[in-house]
């Protein structure tokens, strides 16, 4: 569990109105500008919330449907998160649907802290694998890449420039929990090129519209076909 989790137990609230100020602030996290401002994001589904908790991510609020009070998995998760300091909101289906913007939402939604990492100043082991993504636009594609990177055991993912937000609901859904396993770093182009100098291993590059990929090692750049 994260060291910055609060020591006090969380509070329990019953909310039935979509106009509730707290629900409004949670719904606002569907927009990137509000996620960036608050430093939090939404995760939908008991599996993803549990994966985040078990990987030490800080969960601030758990929202779940009142109809799941007899669901052992949900009540056990709520109890653990409350002990860890998360507030628990028991809501009706209308409120839950307004948060997720889905007619048939998952039973559980979590509000948690974003977790960005710093890339190491110098790569001491060039046999490790990093993935750098330049201006990926589709959140579903980004989530899929994160999931694939997790299965391949990459060291981390660097998001270069105006890449889509990995903490959008679409991206977290597509990652299927891998977002909580793969360190994420963000850099602008200048920062990335400066960091790239510290890399002494193989570099493989590709482009969505390119007919030829490239491979760079110490002796130079060597094109090769996809």
Image (cartoon, grey):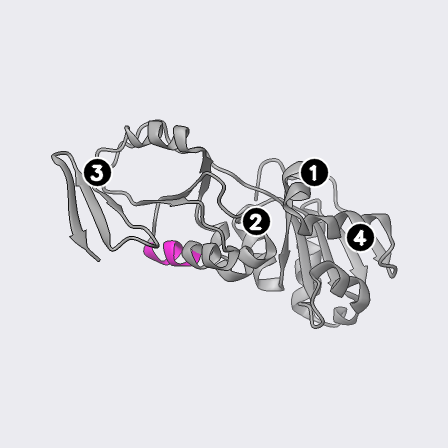
Mark 2 lies on residue = 167
Q: Give the magenta range.
A: 147-152
Earlier residue among tags 2 and 1: 1
- Horizontally, is 14 left or right of 43 in the view? right
**In the structure shown, which secondary structural element does the residue marked by tag 1 occupy?**
loop
Question: Where the N terminus falls, by quadrant?
Answer: top right
Earlier residue among tags 4 and 1: 1
Q: CA distance from mark 2 to mark 1?
A: 26 Å
How far from the left and from the top, in percent, is residue 128?
27, 43
Question: Is 200 rendered above or below residue 211?
Answer: above
Mark 3 lies on residue = 201
| Quadrant assignment, res 97 | bottom right
Q: CA distance from mark 4 to mark 2?
A: 19 Å
Earlier residue among tags 3 and 2: 2
Q: CA distance from mark 3 to mark 4?
A: 48 Å
Identify the mark at residue 7; answer none if there is no mark.
1
Mark 4 lies on residue = 23
Q: Are marks 3 and 4 in contact (CB under 8 Å)?
A: no
**In the structure shown, which secondary structural element does the residue marked by tag 3 occupy?**
loop
């Amino acid at each position: 569990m994260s060291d910055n989790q609060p020591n006090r137990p969380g509070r329990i609230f019953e909310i039935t109105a979509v106009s509730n100020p707290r629900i409004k602030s949670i719904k606002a996290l569907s927009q990137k500008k509000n996620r960036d401002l608050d430093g939090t994001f939404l995760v939908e589904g008991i599996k993803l919330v549990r994966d985040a908790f078990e990987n030490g991510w800080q969960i601030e609020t758990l929202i779940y449907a009142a109809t799941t009070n007899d669901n052992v998995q949900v009540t056990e998760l709520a109890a653990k998160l409350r002990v860890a300091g998360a507030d628990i909101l028991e809501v009706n289906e209308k409120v839950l649907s307004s948060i997720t913007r889905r007619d048939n939402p998952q039973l559980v939604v979590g509000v948690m802290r974003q977790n960005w990492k710093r890339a190491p100043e110098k790569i001491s082991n060039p046999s490790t694998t990093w993935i750098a993504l330049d201006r990926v636009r589709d959140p579903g594609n980004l989530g899929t890449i994160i999931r694939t990177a997790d299965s391949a055991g990459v060291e981390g993912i660097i998001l270069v420039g105006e890449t889509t937000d990995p903490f959008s609901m679409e991206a977290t859904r597509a990652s299927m929990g891998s977002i909580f396993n793969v360190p994420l770093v963000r850099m602008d182009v200048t920062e990335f090129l400066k960091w790239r100098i510290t890399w002494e291993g193989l570099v493989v590059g590709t482009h969505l519209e390119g007919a030829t990929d490239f491979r760079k090692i110490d002796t130079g750049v060597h094109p090769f076909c996809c």
